[in-house]
Amino acid sequence: MTKKRRFMTLNRHIQEGERMHPEATGELSELLHQLGLAAKAISMEVNKAGLVDILGFTGDENVHGEQVKKLDMFAHDILIRAMDHGGHFCVMASEEEENIIHIPKKHRIGKYVLLFDPLDGSSNIDANVSIGTIFSIYKRVTPHGDPGTLEDCLQAGNQQVAAGYIIYGSSTMMVYTAGHGVHGFTLDPQFGEFLLSHEDIRTPDKGRIYSINEGNYLHWRQGLKNYIKYLQSDEFATKPYKARYIGSMVADVHRNLLYGGLFIYPADKRNPQGKLRLQYECNPMAFIVEQAGGLASTGFGRILDIKPEELHQKSPIYLGSKEDVLLVEKFLKEAEDDKHD
Ligand code: AHG
Ligand code: MN
Ligand code: MN
C-alpha cells in the first residue's frame, strides 16, 4: 500500500513545531509565515524576469561596490515592506543597504532582528540560472521597547533562532531551521502554498562534490591548492570528486546539502576575508548546514562562533559534509605548520 503523505503546509508545520514548545508565544511562527508571503511575491517576480522590463542594471552600486540589478532592489523592498509592520522586529539589515534599517515609528517594535540577502547569485538572473534569498533571525540584545541598534545586528551566528533560504530554481523552495532540524517546502504555483517536500534534511557525512570558483586558483593559499589537487587525484579514490559551481551560493549549497559535498569561498591573496558576507550569507547557511549534520568553518574555526564587528563583514567559508570539512581543515593546517617549520 502506498504511504499517504501528510498535507503539510509551511504554516501548519511552523505552528505544529511551536506547539511542542509551550513557552513559545507564536511570534516566530507569525514572522516565518510573513517571510513565506514575501518569498511568494519575490518568486512570482523572479519567474516573470524574462517577460517584463525589469532586467538590466539600475546604474547604482551597492555598499560592496557591485552593480545592483533591479530585481535585487525589488526583493529588498518587498522584504522590508512585508516584515516591518508585524510588530515582531526591532531592526533589520540587508546586504543591499549600508546601514541598519529601522522600523518606522508608526509600527510596534518587537523582540526579533532580521538580517537578509534579498537576492543571492544576482549575476545569474539574466541567464535564467537559479538564484535565492537568505534570511537570519536573532532575538534582540538591547532593551525591549526601544528601537533596535547595530548591537542587535552584530551577534555571533550561534545566537540565531531561525534561518533559511528560498531557492528560485526549477521549482521554488523554502528551506528553514528553527534549531530543530532542517525542513524544505516546495511552492505549488497553482495552489499558492509551500508544501512540505523534504522533511528533516540530513546531509551525507561525506560527499563527492566540490564547489569553488577554480578561476582563482593561483591566488589560493597552499593548503587549499593541495586539497583540491588531492580530490582530483586517483590516490584519493577510485573516482575523483565532481566539480560543480553555479555561482549562486544558495543553489550551490542547496545541491550539496542534498547530495553531500563541500562548498568553498576562500580567502585569497586579493580578498583576505573572502567574498561572502558573514551576517547575510555565511551565518544563516552555516546554521542550516550544521542543523542538517554538516559543518561550517572559516578553514580554521567555526563560522558560527565569530563575533561580528561590522555589519557588512566578510568571511572565508568551507561548508558542507562533516568529513569533507574536517579534511580540508587538516590540509590547511598542515600547510600552515609547514610554513613555520
Ligand atoms: P550576491 O548576488 O548576493 O552578491 O552573491 C553572490 C555571491 C554568491 O552567491 C556566490 O557564491 C558568489 O557570489 C560567487 O562569486 P564568484 O563569481 O566570485 O565565484
Ligand atoms: Mn549573496
Ligand atoms: Mn545579494
Image (spheres, rainbow, N blue to C red):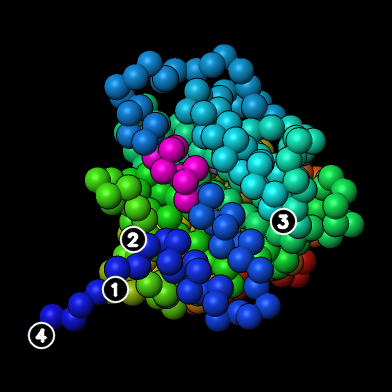
| Residue drawn at (57%, 68%) of the image | 178
Question: Is disc 1 in contact with disc 4, using a CB cutoff of under 8 Å?
Answer: no
Q: Is residue 329 visible?
A: yes
N-terminal label among 2 and 1 = 1
How much space separates mark 2 and mark 3, taking CA atoms? 26 Å
Structural crowding at the residue carrying mark 2, measured as other residues with C-alpha within 10 Å and reported as few (<14), some (14–19) or many (≥20):
many
N-terminal label among 1 and 4 = 4
Q: Which residue is mark 3?
A: 112
User: What amino acid is found at the position of numbered circle 3 in the picture?
Assistant: Tyr
12 vs 173: above or below: below
User: What amino acid is found at the position of numbered circle 4 in the picture?
Assistant: Met
Q: Nearer the viewer, residue 59 or 193?
A: 193
N-terminal label among 1 and 3 = 1
How much space separates mark 2 and mark 1, taking CA atoms? 10 Å
How much space separates mark 3 and mark 4, taking CA atoms? 45 Å
Mark 2 falls on what kind of element? strand
157 vs 60: above or below: below
Q: Position of residue 249 (x, y in %)?
A: 48, 48
Q: Which mark is residue 1?
A: 4
User: What amino acid is found at the position of numbered circle 1 in the picture?
Assistant: Arg
Structural crowding at the residue carrying mark 3, measured as other residues with C-alpha within 10 Å and reported as few (<14), some (14–19) or many (≥20):
many
Question: Is disc 3 in contact with disc 4, using a CB cutoff of under 8 Å?
Answer: no
Q: Nearer the viewer, residue 66 or 138?
A: 138
